[in-house]
Amino acid sequence: MDPERAVPERSGTSPETGSAAPSSRPGSLATSAPTSGSGDRRPPHAAYAAARRHRWLLGPALLLLAIVVVRAFLVTPFGIPSESMQDTLLIGDRILVSRTTAPADLQRGDIIVFDASQAFNLRVPERGIVQTLVEAVESLAGKGQPTDYVKRIIGLPGDRVRCCATDGRLEVNGVAVSEPYVAPGQKPSALTFDVTVPADRFWVMGDNRGSSSDSRAHLGDPGGGMVPGDDIIGKVWVRYWPLGRLGSVDQGQIASVPRNGE
């Protein structure tokens, strides 16, 4: 006989088919407390109360998400770390850069911020997770990456840019151009050059020509110092700091110049 099967002792009557006899062992229970499938015995109102206690996090989370979206698609803050764009932009100026201008819509004279790692053959430092997070937080206050540069567009795709014309000015497609934004006392360029800008690239220079590491300084690098359109972060829009210099940044558009070969 199988010892694991209990066979009731026969008496005058037999139990109903399908009925279960309650255990007669001491301490045994006929029923047990119900539990949820996850084993969580907290009543529903406890979970609701916990959610209410943390709902204050929703506002900051939505604000952070809005900042990330705005920075990624609309405007991005940057700080000016050097004197290369003096006197248009000074060290310590804070600017907003519009990300809505496509490279095809940029004009000669526009001031742009771009990632110079490819155009200027810069080494990109390796970053760990902690450093990446720190830089992400710092970027909210306008601190850019070490490879982010701000310069002025002088040559568009297809332009021939030369220095210098017989009168000492910069020449674009055979036309000597006036550059009122160049820092006082600075020559258009102390370095002579004659380049033709490839398709989808831009020739850029700083306004403080004697203190600017721009396209001229990277003529011998792969790409010849020309900035790819895909590396352009955006066009400088407005200066928001210091308050005494609050306002739009003068783009100093270069006078109309014919296309190369026309």
Image: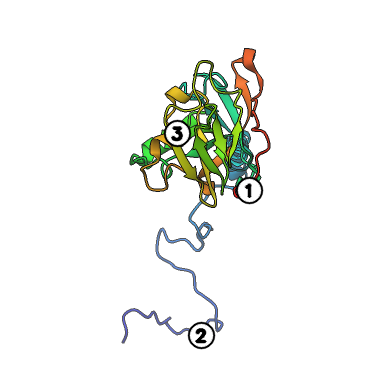
Residue ID for mark 1: 104
Q: Secondary structure at mark 2?
A: loop
- Cα separation, mark 3 vs mark 2, equals 109 Å
Quadrant occupied by the N terminus: bottom left
Residue ID for mark 2: 12
The residue carrying pointer 1 sits among few (fewer than 14), some (14 to 19) or many (20 or more) residues within 10 Å by Cα, namely: few
Place residue 111 in its image quadrant. Answer: top right
Q: What residue is rendered at 52% in x and 84% in y?
A: 14
What x and y, as percent, mark residue 174? 58, 40
Query: Does residue 139 lie above or below 82 as drawn?
Result: below
Q: What residue is rendered at 52% in x and 56% in y?
A: 33
Place residue 178 in its image quadrant. Answer: top right
What x and y, as percent, mark residue 176? 59, 33
Mark 1 or mark 3: name the one nearer the start of the chain. 1
Residue type (three-letter) at the residue carrying disc 3: Asp
What x and y, as percent, mark residue 137? 48, 32
**Residue 160 visible in the picture:** yes
> Mark 2 and mark 3 in contact (Cβ < 8 Å)?
no
Residue 214, disc: 3
Mark 3 or mark 2: name the one nearer the start of the chain. 2
Most extreme residue toward the top is: 244
- Cα separation, mark 1 vs mark 2, equals 101 Å
> Mark 3 and mark 1 in contact (Cβ < 8 Å)?
no
Choose mark 1 or mark 2, whichever is in front: 1
The residue carrying pointer 3 sits among few (fewer than 14), some (14 to 19) or many (20 or more) residues within 10 Å by Cα, namely: many
Q: What residue is rendered at 45% in x and 68% in y?
A: 23
Q: Nearer the viewer, residue 63 or 185?
A: 185
